[in-house]
Amino acid sequence: MSGSLTRADKLLCATYAGIALVALFATWSHNLAFFQQPDNGGLPSFIAAAYANPAAASISNDILFYLLAGWLFMVVEARRLGIKHVWVYLALSGLIAISVMFPLFLITRQAALARRRARP
């Protein structure tokens, strides 16, 4: 991957990777804390908590619609650039977090763009 990446590409990819790493901690530290609570009610209660008040509902809806737009972007870009297995990013963005998987997809996209630039 790094053979065709410029210094600017590498810096951008490192930034994306940093965002993904911080997002993984920021989301899953709270996810685990919720699910470690006794009688947490599982996933239905987790979703209900995301809509516990208007502020939480606003943020939850914002993330949901970003998720949909992000998925659409990933599918379109994957087809355009020949990125295989985009379904993995989609599935893991629902299971792990879109804030983790979207930056990881952007790293893959940046590498595909760099390869495209390097072609004669």
Image (cartoon, rainbow, N blue to C red):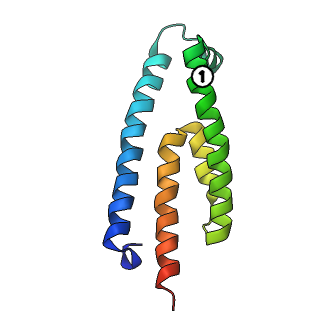
Percent across and percent down for residue 96 are 53, 38
Which residue is depicted at the point 52% across and 64% down?
A: 109
The image shows residue 93, relative to residue 30, as above or below, that is: below
Percent across and percent down for residue 6 are 35, 74
Can residue 44 be seen here? yes
The image shows residue 45, relative to residue 86, as above or below, that is: above
Can residue 49 be seen here? no
- Find residue 82 and report its image quarter: bottom right
- Find residue 21 and report its image quarter: top left
Which residue is depicted at the point 60% across and 31% down?
A: 62
Percent across and percent down for residue 4 are 40, 78
The kind of residue tagged 1 is: Ser
The image shows residue 10, relative to residue 15, as above or below, that is: below
Percent across and percent down for residue 2 are 37, 73
- Are there few (<14), some (14-19), or many (20+) residues within 10 Å of tag 1? few
The image shows residue 95, relative to residue 1, as above or below, that is: above
Which residue in the rendered view is the most extreme toward the bottom? 120
Q: How many marks on residues?
A: 1
Left/right placement of residue 113 relative to residue 73 reads: left
Disc 1 target residue: 58
Q: Secondary structure at mark 1?
A: helix
Which residue is depicted at the point 51% across and 87% down?
A: 119
Which residue is depicted at the point 42% across and 38% down?
A: 24
Split into 4 quadrants, where in the image is the N terminus?
bottom left
Left/right placement of residue 65 relative to residue 19 reads: right
